[in-house]
Image (cartoon, helix red, strand yellow):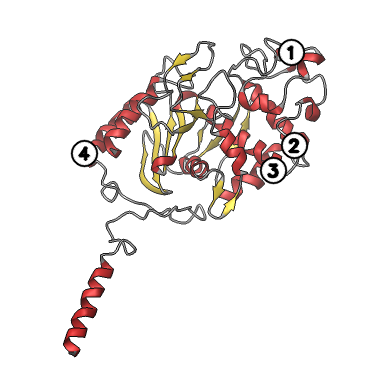
Amino acid sequence: MRRVYSLIIISLSLVACGNDDNPAPDKPDTTMYFPSNPASPWETTSVSQLEWNQSAVQPLLNYLAEKNTKSFMILVNGRIVMEEYFDGHTASTEWEWNSAGKTLVGATTGIAQQESLLSINNRVSDYLGTGWTNMTMEKEDLITVRHLLTMTSGIDDSKQLVVKSNLTWVADAGTRWAYGNVFQKLIDVVSQAGTLEFEPYFNEKLKNRIGMDGYWNYGTIFTIYHSTTRGMARFGLLALNRGKWNNEQIIDETFFTESMNTSQDYNLSYGYFWWLNGKTKYMIPGEQTVFDGPLVPNAPADMYAAMGAMDQRIYVIPGKKMVVVRMGEASDPDNPDFAVSGFDNELWGKINAVID
């Protein structure tokens, strides 16, 4: 009888080892992971563990190299699946985000609101004083912080240098979507609303709390963030988790939800500086044309993305628990400033061949 009990115990042990609660070593960990100290190792998972198509990896890498890429990363559940560097770029090399960095300004504005320093429904002049534009006071008073977040200020977008003489009226605030640099006034709004200048406030409330690296470069026309690829990936991971890092809600989830949804009636594919896939229509920088269809047909419909000139990208795909980062030179040197390009669709065709 004792032998029978022993056999039963052995059998139960074997069943337990095969239970889903005890995954085999070759199965990926599906819990959400957040990298700790930037100097510490970042957990990884492999293409084979995810059962992706290994034979499609090299064609993807070849395409990235051909398109002047400097770095490329894929995270799944926060873990690195691919991390590739090209043309002398390394993990420690910092690179410009260009307009992808608008999402950092938007996130910092959201943090300032949750700390009751400002309200995005208030007029910009409540923080900057009257006369910050070259408009009549009547037209200037129509512009709220939300209008700056949604590119609907009505300010002339043909002049990208953000100085008062260029901030002229084209349409009443809230009646027109036009992509431009006037968003930079949000940096001044955050600075004036609190007791810290924008960059130290950003560092304290966002950058340092998620272990990002990088710095702001304040140019005469553009204010641009620079970081390593992993720094960019950390922000993408924060975005994947709707403003939450590990167990801490860095950015109010309600604000983040607003950021990832259509923010106005003109460009359905635009939130608070985030580009949204899967909508029925979209607009692009520098035009007033409304195009039919999704922004990036080959990409998942639930994707939202930070997009900057020369194809700086953070793609966030909630349904796949995935973040994809691309940094580099322009994929098309003849069209370097286009924030949304055919590159996105071609790249996602290559990515799909790997992950599907």
Q: Amino acid at mark 3?
A: Gln
Mark drawn on residue 165: 1
Instruction: Tell me which numbered mark, 1 or 2, is placed earlier along the sequence.
Output: 2
Q: Residue at x 48, y 42 (%)?
A: 240
From the image, tell me which residue sits under label 2: 118
Instruction: Tell me which numbered mark, 4 or 3, is placed earlier along the sequence.
Output: 4
- Which image quadrant for residue 152? top right
From the image, tell me which residue sits under label 4: 55
Dot 4 falls on a residue whose secondary structure is helix
* Residue closest to the eye, 329 or 116: 116
* Residue closest to the eye, 98 or 278: 278
From the image, tell me which residue sits under label 3: 114
Q: Eyeballing the image, is 287 above or below 35?
A: above
* Residue closest to the eye, 215 or 120: 120
Dot 1 falls on a residue whose secondary structure is helix
Marks 4 and 1 sit apart, C-alpha to C-alpha, by 56 Å
Instruction: Tell me which numbered mark, 4 or 1, is placed earlier along the sequence.
Output: 4
Marks 3 and 1 sit apart, C-alpha to C-alpha, by 33 Å
Indicate left or right for 201 with 240 as reference.
Answer: right
Q: Residue furthest front?
A: 1
Q: Amino acid at mark 4?
A: Ser
